[in-house]
Each structure stands twice: as C-alpha cells, then as structure tokens.
Amino acid sequence: MTTRSYLVLHGWQNRRPGGHWQHWLADRLTALGHRVTYPQLPDPDDPDLEAWLGELARHLEELDESGERVVVAHSLSAVLWLHAAARGMKEQRYADRVLLVAPPSASVLVRYPEVAGFAPPVPGFVLPGRTRLVAGDDDPYCPEGAGPAFGAPLGIPTDIVPGAAHLDLDAGYGSWPAVLDWCLGDPAPLTARPQQ
C-alpha cells in the first residue's frame, strides 16, 4: 500500500462538523492507515488571510516526506491555496497533489467584509503540484461557474458536478466516495455522491 499524508482544509464558518464530507474523508483515510491532518483554522467566522496563510505553511511543513503528500481544500481554503501560490509560498512545494473544491468567486467574497480580503488573486502564477478543481454547476458561491472563473484562467483540470451546489452538508455531501477515490489515486473525474 502506498503511504500518503493528507492535509484537509475547511472553509468559512466551517467548524468541522462531524457530518461533513471532509470529516468523513479524514476518518476513512485514517482508518486506511494514512496520516491525516484536519485542523481547525483560526477564527473561521471572521478569518484573517495572513493568519490562515501562516497555518497553511505550518501544516504543510509537517506533512510526512516519506510518501505522497495530498492537500484537499474546500471553499475559502481553496482560495487560500491560490493566494499562497500567487505569493510563491515555498511550503507549497511539499504538496504532490491538490484538490480545490468549490472555491468561491471574487464577486461573492467582496460582498462580505469578513472574507473580502480573500478575493482570489489575479491569475498569472504557477500552481505547485498536480492540481485539480471540482465544483457544482449551480454553486451559489460561484455564480460565474468554477470552470470560467478558475479552471480556464489557471489551466487546471476541472470536474463540474451537476446539481452539487457548494459541495457541502446543505447539498447532501456527508459522504462522498468519489473524493476518497481521488485521494487514493484514482484519476477518474470526480462525480456526485450516490443518492441514498
């Protein structure tokens, strides 16, 4: 079995509820014997970009270097990853693969003072590692569509999931087998969670 270490990063106002797919994912990966870090980022209701960048750097440095290092970032943390790349944050080189899930667009972030400072940086920077994007085709936090807003300008492979909204608990994403498969190395496009 390939040993991997994972860093799972949450979004705005997310206090890592037990039913969220990220919690489900962290539990599954841990049960399979992988090292998983799923930190509570500081002040999730009123986040500070610099503080989150500092936490990102710290957790990346702690990833196990003996195997593949994978980052899974949802919502505001997906945009956090872009800010780190735009700044050339050296710790990002510690990630071999990155999955950006449902990043919110600038048009949405600037409407909220708590997260306006996270508005995505202008493309023109290089994303480290192999990066992939997945988003719903009806995400209210990215009305422009993740493909046009992020995938095309950044030149990264993008999976658009019909009817998946923000890929969160409200959209029914408590378990999500496709993201587990991706984490374990399956190159197939990410798909919706099965209906229960």
Image (spheres, grey):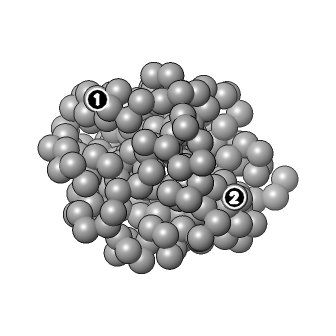
Please tell me whether residue 157 is drawn above or below residue 87 in the rendered image. below
> Can you identify the residue that label 1 sits on?
54
Please name whichever residue, 32 or 120, is drawn nearer the observer in this view of the structure.
Answer: 120
Report the residue at 66% width, 28% height from top.
17
Q: Position of residue 70 (x, y in %)?
A: 35, 47
Report the residue at 38% width, 35% height from top.
49
Regarding mark 2 in the picture, which secondary structure is present there?
loop
Give the left or right position of residue 138, taking residue 38 as reference.
right
> Can you identify the residue that label 2 sits on?
140
Please name whichever residue, 157 or 78, is drawn nearer the observer in this view of the structure.
Answer: 78
Please name whichever residue, 176 or 117, is drawn nearer the observer in this view of the structure.
Answer: 117
The reply to whether callout 1 and callout 2 are in contact (CB within 8 Å) is no
Q: CA distance from mark 1 to mark 2?
A: 28 Å
Q: Residues within 10 Å of mark 1 (few under 14, many from 20)?
A: few
Regarding mark 1 in the picture, which secondary structure is present there?
helix
Report the residue at 63% width, 55% height from top.
141
Give the left or right position of residue 85, taking residue 164 as reference.
left
Disc number at residue 18? none
Q: Residues within 10 Å of mark 2 (few under 14, many from 20)?
A: some
